[in-house]
Amino acid sequence: MKPVALITGANRGIGFEIARQLGSKGFEILLGARDAEEGQAAAERLGGTWLPLDVGEAESVREAADWTRSEHGRLDVLINNAGILLDEASGVLDFDEAAVLATLQVNLLGAWRMASAFAPFMERGGRIVNLSSGAGQLSRMGTWAPAYSVSKAALNAHTLQLAQALESRGIAVNAVCPGWVRTRMGGSGARKSVEDGADTPVWLATEAPASLTGRFFRDRREIPW
Ligand code: NDP
């Protein structure tokens, strides 16, 4: 039986590429996406399964978890990739409250509710990878896109807590900055291809030593929180 991997926001960008690479490594891939047409098209291209999933909606996450459990019985790898960047043009003081809430709803709570819904049927050796960002590093915190940056710092804090909560069950949980990647979010001027951006997330989901947990990585190297 193939190991099962679920990638959120897999219809495009880094998520699609992570799904492609995991598929080529022999995983059964479940492509989480909120748009039916895009989700189905991506799944068809990669020979995976589209899983209807809006990580901003608790009910959608619950339904996806119920389906995965009844169809596959377990999940081996969870990649929390879905993310939004709404406030590149905002300052810390002239902030848009709705944008802050929407950003936290997806970037923090999305990953949190995914872990809570799917970890119960992950087994020893399972891996959870959270797509974070250098923008969320407290040691280098700036003022760019304040809601996005705070959401990724919060996601990092959640990663540390989740790693501790799942340590006794042998499930590794790590955060990763993919680098600046050419996607709709990263823009066409970004330095990295999606192949390079997906490399460290895929490494953490597969070949990285299972003892690595509760850490933050970029380019397969640990970086400060
Ligand atoms: P894109 O904007 O290209 O893709 C984002 C993906 O997330 C899309 O598939 C989108 O789906 C999905 N998504 C957004 N909201 C939801 C939701 N509520 N439920 C389900 N899916 C959702 O971004 P990237 O591929 O560039 O980024 C992937 C991850 O990497 C993000 O977490 C991002 O913060 C992080 N990252 C990216 C960097 C970069 O330079 N690109 C740098 C650092 C971190 P839809 O098509 O439906 O909108």
Image (cartoon, rainbow, N blue to C red):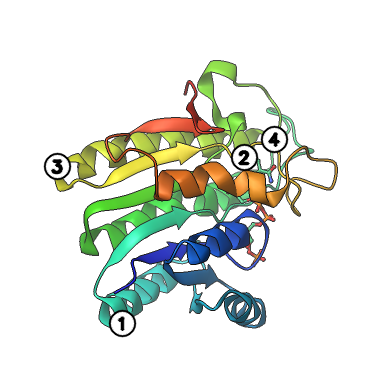
Amino acid on which disc 2 is placed: Tyr
Amino acid on which disc 3 is placed: Ser
Q: Give the x, y percent position of residue 153.
A: 50, 32
Q: Which residue is mark 4?
A: 145
Q: Residue at x 49, y 49 (%)?
A: 202
Q: CA distance from mark 1 to mark 2?
A: 35 Å
Q: Residue at x 34, y 80 (%)?
A: 67
Q: Of callouts 1 and 2, which one flags the residue occurring earlier in the amino acid sequence?
A: 1
Circle on res. 148:
2
Mark 4 Cα-neighbour bin, 10 Å: few <14, some 14–19, many ≥20: many
Q: Are marks 2 and 4 in contact (CB under 8 Å)?
A: yes
Classify residue 176 as left or right of residue 124. Answer: right
* Depth order, front residue of 166/89: 166
Q: Of callouts 3 and 1, which one flags the residue occurring earlier in the amino acid sequence?
A: 1
Q: CA distance from mark 4 to mark 1?
A: 40 Å
Mark 3 Cα-neighbour bin, 10 Å: few <14, some 14–19, many ≥20: few
When asked about the image quadrant of residue 207, the answer is top left
Q: Of callouts 2 and 3, which one flags the residue occurring earlier in the amino acid sequence?
A: 2
Circle on res. 71:
1
Vertical position of residue 148 compared to residue 59: above or below: above
When asked about the image quadrant of residue 144, the answer is top right
* Depth order, front residue of 218/154: 218
Q: Residue at x 56, y 33 (%)?
A: 219
When asked about the image quadrant of residue 118, the answer is bottom left
Q: Which residue is mark 3?
A: 168
Q: Give the x, y percent position of residue 79.
A: 45, 55
